Amino acid sequence: MKTKHFYGKGLPNVDPSLLKGTLIVIEGSDGAGRSTQIGLLRDWLERKGYPTVVVGLKRSELVGEALAAAMQGNTLNATTLKLFYATDFADQLERVIIPSLKAGFVVLADRYIYTLMARDIARGSALDWLKDIYGFALVPDAVFYLNVNPKTLAERNFQKRGYLDYWESGMDIMRVGGMYDNFIKYQGKLHRVFETLQKEFGFTTVHGGRSAFKIAKEIRNRIEKILSASSAAEKSAMALEISSVNNIHSDDHPA
């Protein structure tokens, strides 16, 4: 298992080598099936004996509720929105993700910095600038982007809640007719940005138009390899520690 590390300078006073847990990220737009996959993953992991914790956007105790309330008015500008989300993420990283990983939990993130970057790039931000902003973020052990075409996303959103979200339709930055047309165009733009981010960060793109169980099986197979490697590394480290202790005792009490 590779030692964990940050994308940039990271958080102060945090030693990544002490983070023994596993960070799994599920990315994708509203309607891609993230919540379903997070739920299936959590059930599977806990049946296998792994303690889990789930994090996601707008769940920070510090600003989560304020961010959700501010977005209801559809009046936030792009800069305020990105700073709100960055604060929300930073607070969860420090208060939930890092402590959970120290305790050996599997952390399931319902979206991570990649969605925040994609949205900001769609609104005119430069990737290099965003990489500096999110340099404090921890590099996940695995990232899965659920790729679903915009028309299917729209259909799923209509089926789930009967309308399309203002922000997920990019209504704050473009107007190309009705909200449906705007949604299709904006989600297409996000998909192209995610293609760029995939090349930059090397995460796994998963075809999200299949059944939930087929997707879950693919993700589980990949995660199982990560967990097996982690378990093997822990056993190896423990064996080395025991060997070192035995050698010390042997030196203290020669035959």
Image (cartoon, rainbow, N blue to C red):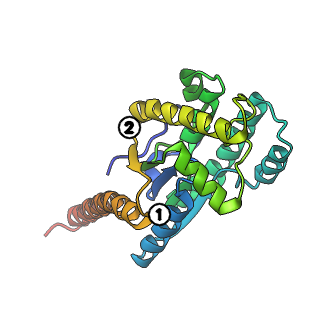
**Residue 7 sits above or below residue 243 on the image:** above
How many neighbours does mark 1 have within 10 angstroms: few (below 14), some (14-19), or many (20 or more)? some
**Residue 45 sits above or below residue 7 on the image:** below
The residue nearer to you, when weighing 148 against 69, is: 148
Element type at marker 2? loop
The residue nearer to you, when weighing 212 against 202, is: 212
**Residue 102 sits above or below residue 187 on the image:** below
x%, y% of residue 148?
48, 48
* Residue reaching furthest to the bottom: 47
How many neighbours does mark 2 have within 10 angstroms: few (below 14), some (14-19), or many (20 or more)? few
x%, y% of residue 20?
43, 57
Q: Residue at x 49, y 62 (%)?
A: 37
Q: Is residue 42 visible?
A: yes
Which residue in the structure is indicated by mark 2? 202
Question: What amino acid type should be assigned to the residue bearing mark 1?
Answer: Gly
* Residue reaching furthest to the front: 177
Q: Residue 252 has which mark? A: none
Left or right, residue 204 beside residue 70 = left
Element type at marker 1? loop
Which residue in the structure is indicated by mark 1? 104
Q: Residue at x 72, y 28 (%)?
A: 173
x%, y% of residue 5?
45, 41
Q: Residue at x 47, y 63 (%)?
A: 104
Q: Is residue 28 visible?
A: no
Q: CA distance from mark 2 to mark 1?
A: 25 Å
